[in-house]
Amino acid sequence: MTATDPTAPAPRAPRSTVVAELRGATRIYQMGPTKVRALDGIDIQFLEGSYTAIMGASGSGKSTMLNILGCLDRPTDGQYILAGRDVSDLDDDNLSGERNRRLGFVFQAYNLIPHLTVLENVEVPMEYGGVSPGEARVRATRLAERMGLGDRLDHRPTELSGGQQQRVAIARALANDPVVLLADEPTGNLDSKTGLEILSLLDELHAQGRTLIIVTHDPKVAARADRTIHMLDGKVQRIEERAS
């Protein structure tokens, strides 16, 4: 395997390199005549190899923060520095390119393409990233097998259980060897047993050096992270740090 092979365990990071940073990040939405300050001057850093949970009630700003960290939205004011590059003012095409190269996503609803097989779903980010079809097939196969899906490669999402679909989503998220893996309520649609299996898989990825940021409403899920950011009214209310 090559050093950039996303199926290979990443070396454990020393947690000194900042891979994502919000500097005075504010997000204001115009709702008719009213301006809603969804994010209000956030300053926060995410270190390489760290595992961060974001919690807060509906309207607290946690989803807005995740959207900005995931390059799905931009701050109205302030900066977002991703892997050393200020991506705050990039146009849509360049922002999309950064998102595909630097980030991996795991969603509550899986967001798989229903008419594609497991392998084809995992290959999608690599196609947009310019990976050759042959290399994409090799990497997708390795990732799917690593997720325990070696006997499901030709199955479509409707032929899989919820846990299997989420494993496909994780494999897809790792396809381009992302700087940061983001997860939005990744166990929200799963039963407790399957949810624990997915959380254990995320724990394993973290142990291998992956940088994880997860949004959750469940304190038990957040307790698995090194750090929990509690959001309230668009601000960081408090941060809990846990010993490694």
Image (cartoon, grey):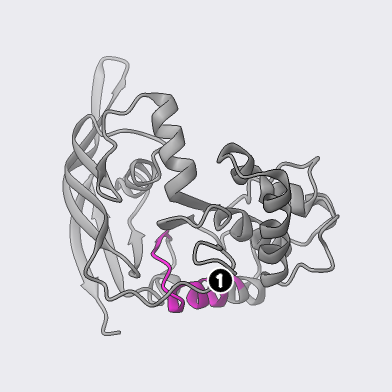
Q: Residue at x 39, y 65 (%)?
A: 211
User: Disc 1 on helix, strand or loop?
Assistant: loop
**How far across and down, in percent of the image, does residue 169 sit?**
63, 55
- Quadrant, the N terminus: bottom right
Q: Is residue 119 left or right of residue 210?
A: right
The residue closer to the viewer here, 185 or 120, is 120
**How far across and down, in percent of the image, does residue 165 sit?**
71, 58
Disc 1 crowd rating (10 Å Cα; few below 14, some 14-19, many 20+) is some
Residue range in magenta is 198-215
Quarter of the view holding residue 159: bottom right
**How far across and down, in percent of the image, does residue 212 sit?**
41, 64
The residue closer to the viewer here, 54 or 97, is 97
Q: Is residue 108 left or right of residue 99?
A: right
Q: Residue at x 84, y 68 (%)?
A: 151
Residue 239 among magenta residues: no
Residue receiving disc 1: 8
Q: Is residue 163 above or below residue 77?
A: below
Residue 206 among magenta residues: yes
- Quadrant, the C terminus: bottom left
Q: Is residue 84 above or below residue 143?
A: above
| Residue type, label 1 | Ala
Q: Is residue 198 left or right of residue 20?
A: right
Q: Residue at x 66, y 72 (%)?
A: 194
The residue closer to the viewer here, 139 or 221, is 139
